[in-house]
Structure formats: C-alpha cells, structure tokens
Image (tube, rainbow, N blue to C red):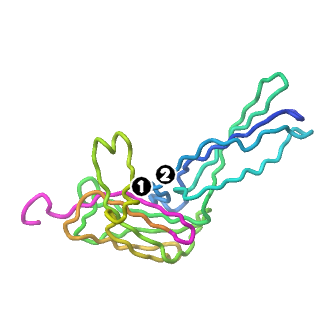
Amino acid sequence: LHGADAPYLKADIERKLTVHSAQFSGYDNYQFEDPSKTFNQAESMIFEGKLDPLGKAKVYPKIDIKDAPGMLMAQFTVRAFEKSGNFSIDRLNIPYSPYRSYVGVKVPEGKGWNGALFSDEPNIISIATVDEFGKSVNKSNLKVEIFNIGWRWWWDRSRGDDLAQFVRNSTQNLIKSDVVNTKNGKALYELTFDEHSYGRKFIRITDPSTGHSCGKSFYVTYKGWWNDDGS
C-alpha cells in the first residue's frame, strides 16, 4: 500500500456502492436523484490473490448496476497481508456514474404555509439536463409525472418515506403526466392543479433514453382555505 515494494504478498479488495448526491456546478437546489428508487448494494470482494514481483496487481472491477437513483460512490477497502499474518489496510472513495446524463428538478418555495405551493395558481418548475460531468445537454421527450403522496406522522417519522409504493401504484396515485424537451439543457414546466387541491405531492421526471429519473416531494394548498369566502 505504501513504502517499499512487497512482492507476492496476499491481498484482497472489497467494494461497496452507496448513493452519492450529485453536486453539479451552477445547479444549486436542483435534485438529480430519485428518492422513489431504493438502492441496497451489498459489499462484494472484487479481488483476492497475490501481488506481482513489484508488489502490484491490476484489478478491473466490473460494475453492473440497474436502475440506480443517481450518482454513486464506490468505496474500496484494500488489505495486504504480511507473512506474519498481520495486514495493512487502506480505503479510498471514487465517484461512479451509472448514467451518461442526468435530469434534475427544482421545485420553488411556495407562498403557502411551510413553503406549500398554491394549487389555484400556476407554479413554474425548473428542469435541467446535464452529462455526467455537469455540462448541459439537450434532451427530448422527458416524462413528467405528478403523484398524490400520503402522509401519516407515526409512519413517516418512524420508518421514512416509502415513495416507491405510491409511484408503483400509479393507477391510484398518478394525477397527471406530460412530456417536455430541454433546450440548452433547461426547461420550464408550468404545473397546475384543480383549484382546491391540497396535500403532499411528488414530481418525477424520467429520461427514457437513459432510464435516469429524478424526483422531489412537496406540499400544495390553496388560497383562502382558512375561511369560507375564499379571500
């Protein structure tokens, strides 16, 4: 790992993949991950063997990931064993991109209580598409979906959001779907609801060309919900 050459020593490398929040320059407050997708990647041994006469080994880790929620982090744990049985250990983290491009969404803060959007007026949702290095790219036929999401304080606070079940049950929970294109890597989507819609919603945007999607939950209310005359 460090210091003098260590020929023919036994070594192994373990890899673990975790979700890594993408931070692309110039896209503050954009969400490039899909929280409705679950990702559980167990640790796996990608190398077990002996080092060469120079104390080195070439490793070509194969990563086969489907339907990741976004950018990932590959965590490697490297061990080299001395003849005595003691071992040295080193760790390194390397960002890994399972997609060639990413779609991101930014939901504005609304004027309602706790930042809720008003359902009885148009709301502008910002959409961005970038490559894996953060450079803007144009995309066509991005699928926009809006879902109704339930909220129960005793369930959400103890177990976390299970957005996946609401998205899977699209027959019951899907409010609307639409298609948008980006130009110069940007698009503005006008989100409208029935006049007196309220509650918790989830927007998901999918790029059919890559399979990547992003999503964001938010609340909506309507003006005048607190009285009878709607003022």
- Looking at the rendered structure, the kind of residue marked 2 is Thr
- Mark 1 lies on residue: 164
Of residues 123 and 57, which is closer to you in this image?
57
- Looking at the rendered structure, the kind of residue marked 1 is Ala
Q: Residues within 10 Å of mark 1 (few under 14, many from 20)?
A: few
Q: Quadrant of the N terminus?
A: top right
> Residue 159, percent across and down?
38, 42
Q: Residue at x 73, y 40 (%)?
A: 13
> Residue 195, percent across and down?
20, 70
> Residue 101, percent across and down?
58, 66
In the picture provided, is 120 more to the left or to the right than 68?
left
Residue 142 colored in magenta in the image: no
Q: Quadrant of the C terminus?
A: bottom left
- Vertical position of residue 26 compared to residue 47: above or below: below
Q: Residue at x 39, y 55 (%)?
A: 165
Q: Residue at x 85, y 25 (%)?
A: 83
Of residues 167 and 191, which is closer to you in this image?
167
Give the magenta part as a residue range: 207-230
Lower position in the chain sequence, tag 2 or tag 1: 2
Real-space Cα separation, disc 2 to disc 1, in angstroms: 8 Å
> Residue 166, percent across and down?
36, 57
- Mark 2 lies on residue: 38
Work out which residue is located at the far right of the displayed protein and give it.
53
